[in-house]
Image (spheres, coloured by chain):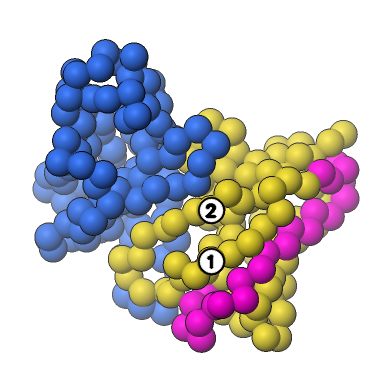
Amino acid sequence: DAKTTQPPSMDCAEGRAANLPCNHSTISGNEYVYWYRQIHSQGPQYIIHGLKNNETNEMASLIITEDRKSSTLILPHATLRDTAVYYCIVRTNNAGNMLTFGGGTRLMVKP
Amino acid sequence: GAGVSQSPSNKVTEKGKDVELRCDPISGHTALYWYRQSLGQGLEFLIYFQGNSAPDKSGLPSDRFSAERTGGSVSTLTIQRTQQEDSAVYLCASRKSTGTGLLNEQFFGPGTRLTVL
Protein backbone atom coordinates (compact mmCIF):
# COMPACT_ATOMS: atom_id res chain seq x y z
CA ASP A 1 0.00 0.00 0.00
CA ALA A 2 1.18 3.51 -0.77
CA LYS A 3 1.98 5.62 2.26
CA THR A 4 -0.60 8.05 3.61
CA THR A 5 -0.20 10.86 6.07
CA GLN A 6 -2.95 11.93 8.45
CA PRO A 7 -3.01 14.26 11.45
CA PRO A 8 -2.96 12.21 14.66
CA SER A 9 -5.99 13.87 16.19
CA MET A 10 -8.78 16.36 15.55
CA ASP A 11 -11.69 17.81 17.49
CA CYS A 12 -15.10 18.69 16.10
CA ALA A 13 -18.19 20.20 17.66
CA GLU A 14 -21.32 18.10 17.58
CA GLY A 15 -23.54 19.02 14.63
CA ARG A 16 -20.73 20.64 12.69
CA ALA A 17 -18.95 19.19 9.68
CA ALA A 18 -15.83 17.17 10.36
CA ASN A 19 -13.20 17.47 7.63
CA LEU A 20 -10.46 14.85 7.86
CA PRO A 21 -7.48 15.34 5.56
CA CYS A 22 -5.20 12.72 4.09
CA ASN A 23 -2.05 13.11 1.99
CA HIS A 24 -1.10 10.37 -0.46
CA SER A 25 1.40 12.03 -2.76
CA THR A 26 2.83 8.75 -4.11
CA ILE A 27 -0.51 7.25 -5.11
CA SER A 28 -0.43 5.23 -8.34
CA GLY A 29 -2.89 5.59 -11.18
CA ASN A 30 -4.72 2.38 -10.37
CA GLU A 31 -4.93 2.91 -6.62
CA TYR A 32 -8.12 3.89 -4.90
CA VAL A 33 -8.50 5.97 -1.75
CA TYR A 34 -10.35 4.08 0.98
CA TRP A 35 -11.55 5.32 4.33
CA TYR A 36 -12.32 3.13 7.32
CA ARG A 37 -13.04 4.03 10.91
CA GLN A 38 -12.72 2.17 14.16
CA ILE A 39 -14.87 2.99 17.12
CA HIS A 40 -13.40 2.03 20.47
CA SER A 41 -13.54 -1.73 21.12
CA GLN A 42 -15.02 -2.47 17.72
CA GLY A 43 -13.61 -3.76 14.44
CA PRO A 44 -12.86 -1.35 11.59
CA GLN A 45 -15.84 -0.20 9.54
CA TYR A 46 -15.74 0.65 5.84
CA ILE A 47 -16.90 4.22 5.11
CA ILE A 48 -16.29 5.13 1.50
CA HIS A 49 -13.80 4.85 -1.34
CA GLY A 50 -13.04 6.61 -4.62
CA LEU A 51 -10.62 6.74 -7.52
CA LYS A 52 -10.65 10.31 -8.81
CA ASN A 53 -14.21 11.61 -8.70
CA ASN A 54 -15.79 12.89 -5.54
CA GLU A 55 -18.04 10.34 -3.86
CA THR A 56 -20.95 10.57 -1.45
CA ASN A 57 -22.89 7.96 0.43
CA GLU A 58 -25.13 7.85 3.49
CA MET A 59 -22.16 8.07 5.83
CA ALA A 60 -19.81 10.63 4.32
CA SER A 61 -18.44 12.49 1.33
CA LEU A 62 -14.99 12.00 -0.16
CA ILE A 63 -13.27 14.86 -1.94
CA ILE A 64 -10.19 13.91 -3.97
CA THR A 65 -7.96 16.62 -5.40
CA GLU A 66 -7.47 16.77 -9.14
CA ASP A 67 -3.86 15.59 -8.87
CA ARG A 68 -5.05 12.82 -6.49
CA LYS A 69 -2.27 13.57 -4.05
CA SER A 70 -4.64 14.33 -1.21
CA SER A 71 -8.22 13.81 -0.15
CA THR A 72 -10.67 14.90 2.51
CA LEU A 73 -13.32 12.84 4.25
CA ILE A 74 -16.31 14.94 5.23
CA LEU A 75 -18.82 13.96 7.90
CA PRO A 76 -21.47 16.63 7.25
CA HIS A 77 -23.11 16.66 10.69
CA ALA A 78 -20.86 14.98 13.20
CA THR A 79 -22.47 13.23 16.16
CA LEU A 80 -20.94 11.93 19.36
CA ARG A 81 -21.12 8.43 17.88
CA ASP A 82 -18.72 9.51 15.15
CA THR A 83 -15.92 9.67 17.71
CA ALA A 84 -13.44 7.12 16.37
CA VAL A 85 -10.07 6.64 14.71
CA TYR A 86 -10.34 7.30 10.98
CA TYR A 87 -7.96 5.51 8.62
CA CYS A 88 -7.12 6.63 5.10
CA ILE A 89 -5.44 4.02 2.90
CA VAL A 90 -4.68 3.72 -0.78
CA ARG A 91 -4.73 0.44 -2.60
CA THR A 92 -5.65 -1.22 -5.86
CA ASN A 93 -9.16 -2.57 -6.20
CA ASN A 94 -8.05 -6.09 -7.08
CA ALA A 95 -9.42 -9.09 -5.35
CA GLY A 96 -7.35 -10.28 -2.46
CA ASN A 97 -5.92 -7.04 -1.18
CA MET A 98 -5.22 -7.10 2.51
CA LEU A 99 -5.61 -3.87 4.40
CA THR A 100 -2.73 -2.15 6.11
CA PHE A 101 -3.63 0.71 8.40
CA GLY A 102 -1.32 3.37 9.71
CA GLY A 103 -1.96 5.47 12.76
CA GLY A 104 -5.06 7.24 11.48
CA THR A 105 -6.73 10.36 12.87
CA ARG A 106 -8.42 10.18 16.24
CA LEU A 107 -11.56 12.31 15.84
CA MET A 108 -13.16 13.52 19.04
CA VAL A 109 -16.67 14.92 18.61
CA LYS A 110 -17.53 17.16 21.51
CA PRO A 111 -20.96 18.33 22.69
CA GLY B 1 -28.19 -10.06 7.92
CA ALA B 2 -25.68 -11.31 10.47
CA GLY B 3 -22.25 -9.81 10.40
CA VAL B 4 -18.88 -11.38 11.08
CA SER B 5 -18.75 -12.97 14.50
CA GLN B 6 -15.75 -13.94 16.55
CA SER B 7 -15.29 -15.96 19.70
CA PRO B 8 -14.29 -15.66 22.40
CA SER B 9 -14.53 -11.90 22.79
CA ASN B 10 -11.83 -11.99 25.45
CA LYS B 11 -9.20 -14.59 26.21
CA VAL B 12 -6.68 -14.53 29.02
CA THR B 13 -4.04 -17.23 28.96
CA GLU B 14 -0.73 -18.06 30.53
CA LYS B 15 2.54 -17.87 28.66
CA GLY B 16 3.28 -21.14 26.92
CA LYS B 17 -0.32 -22.23 26.50
CA ASP B 18 -2.02 -22.77 23.13
CA VAL B 19 -5.10 -20.74 22.13
CA GLU B 20 -7.70 -21.06 19.40
CA LEU B 21 -9.65 -18.11 18.08
CA ARG B 22 -12.75 -18.59 15.96
CA CYS B 23 -14.24 -16.54 13.14
CA ASP B 24 -17.63 -16.98 11.49
CA PRO B 25 -17.68 -14.91 8.30
CA ILE B 26 -20.73 -13.47 6.60
CA SER B 27 -22.57 -16.21 4.73
CA GLY B 28 -21.57 -16.31 1.09
CA HIS B 29 -18.34 -14.39 1.57
CA THR B 30 -15.53 -16.32 -0.05
CA ALA B 31 -12.59 -14.25 1.21
CA LEU B 32 -11.53 -14.29 4.85
CA TYR B 33 -8.73 -12.34 6.53
CA TRP B 34 -7.07 -12.44 9.92
CA TYR B 35 -5.39 -9.32 11.33
CA ARG B 36 -4.08 -8.30 14.67
CA GLN B 37 -3.98 -4.93 16.29
CA SER B 38 -1.72 -4.17 19.20
CA LEU B 39 -2.60 -1.41 21.65
CA GLY B 40 -2.67 1.92 19.84
CA GLN B 41 -1.28 0.44 16.65
CA GLY B 42 -2.68 0.02 13.18
CA LEU B 43 -3.74 -3.21 11.57
CA GLU B 44 -1.23 -5.99 10.91
CA PHE B 45 -2.17 -8.53 8.26
CA LEU B 46 -1.73 -12.17 9.25
CA ILE B 47 -3.34 -14.54 6.74
CA TYR B 48 -5.85 -14.53 3.88
CA PHE B 49 -8.13 -17.27 2.54
CA GLN B 50 -9.81 -17.05 -0.86
CA GLY B 51 -12.16 -19.85 -1.81
CA ASN B 52 -10.33 -23.13 -2.33
CA SER B 53 -7.00 -21.51 -3.14
CA ALA B 54 -3.95 -21.98 -0.96
CA PRO B 55 -3.99 -19.35 1.78
CA ASP B 56 -1.66 -16.37 1.77
CA LYS B 57 0.32 -16.86 4.98
CA SER B 58 2.83 -14.11 4.34
CA GLY B 59 1.81 -12.10 7.39
CA LEU B 60 2.13 -14.80 10.03
CA PRO B 61 4.84 -13.63 12.45
CA SER B 62 6.19 -17.06 13.36
CA ASP B 63 5.56 -20.78 12.94
CA ARG B 64 3.66 -20.71 16.23
CA PHE B 65 0.80 -19.15 14.31
CA SER B 66 -1.45 -21.16 12.00
CA ALA B 67 -4.95 -20.92 10.65
CA GLU B 68 -7.39 -23.09 8.82
CA ARG B 69 -10.71 -22.58 7.18
CA THR B 70 -12.99 -25.57 7.09
CA GLY B 71 -15.57 -25.96 4.36
CA GLY B 72 -14.90 -22.50 3.06
CA SER B 73 -16.67 -20.92 6.00
CA VAL B 74 -15.56 -20.94 9.64
CA SER B 75 -11.92 -20.20 10.34
CA THR B 76 -9.75 -20.93 13.36
CA LEU B 77 -6.54 -19.09 14.20
CA THR B 78 -4.26 -21.11 16.47
CA ILE B 79 -1.37 -19.69 18.45
CA GLN B 80 0.91 -22.28 20.03
CA ARG B 81 3.14 -21.67 23.04
CA THR B 82 1.81 -18.14 23.46
CA GLN B 83 4.20 -15.33 24.37
CA GLN B 84 3.45 -12.02 26.03
CA GLU B 85 4.10 -10.18 22.78
CA ASP B 86 1.18 -12.09 21.26
CA SER B 87 -1.18 -9.98 23.37
CA ALA B 88 -3.35 -8.01 20.96
CA VAL B 89 -6.80 -7.79 19.47
CA TYR B 90 -7.21 -10.38 16.73
CA LEU B 91 -9.62 -9.25 14.04
CA CYS B 92 -11.30 -11.31 11.36
CA ALA B 93 -12.79 -9.84 8.20
CA SER B 94 -14.68 -11.30 5.29
CA ARG B 95 -15.33 -10.05 1.81
CA LYS B 96 -17.70 -11.06 -0.95
CA SER B 97 -15.30 -11.75 -3.75
CA THR B 98 -16.94 -10.43 -6.89
CA GLY B 99 -13.93 -9.78 -9.06
CA THR B 100 -12.07 -6.62 -9.89
CA GLY B 101 -13.47 -3.17 -10.28
CA LEU B 102 -16.33 -3.68 -7.88
CA LEU B 103 -16.91 -2.74 -4.31
CA ASN B 104 -14.88 -5.15 -2.26
CA GLU B 105 -14.77 -3.65 1.15
CA GLN B 106 -14.00 -5.98 4.01
CA PHE B 107 -16.45 -6.43 6.86
CA PHE B 108 -14.83 -6.86 10.22
CA GLY B 109 -15.84 -8.78 13.28
CA PRO B 110 -15.62 -7.30 16.78
CA GLY B 111 -12.30 -9.01 17.47
CA THR B 112 -10.91 -11.24 20.20
CA ARG B 113 -8.82 -9.51 22.84
CA LEU B 114 -6.00 -11.87 23.76
CA THR B 115 -4.00 -11.26 26.91
CA VAL B 116 -0.99 -13.46 27.62
CA LEU B 117 0.15 -13.27 31.22
Mark 2 lies on a secondary structure that is loop
Q: Do labels 1 and 2 share a chain?
A: yes
Q: Compare residues B55 and B29 and report the one nearer the observer.
A: B55
Residue A3 tag number: 1
Q: In x, y percent, where is residue A38?
A: 57, 43
Q: In x, y percent, where is residue B111?
A: 40, 34
> Label 2 sits on what residue type?
Gly
Residue A27: quadrant of the picture: bottom right
Whichever of callouts 1 and 2 sits on the residue coming sooner in the sequence is: 1
B44 in relation to B86, above or below? below
Q: Compare residues A83 and B62 and report the one nearer the observer.
A: B62
| Magenta-colored stretch includes residue A27 | yes
Q: Do the residues labelled 1 and 2 touch (CB within 8 Å)?
A: yes
Residue drawn at x 36%, y 36% is B90
Q: What residue is pinned by disc 2?
A: A102
- Which chain is depicted yellow? A
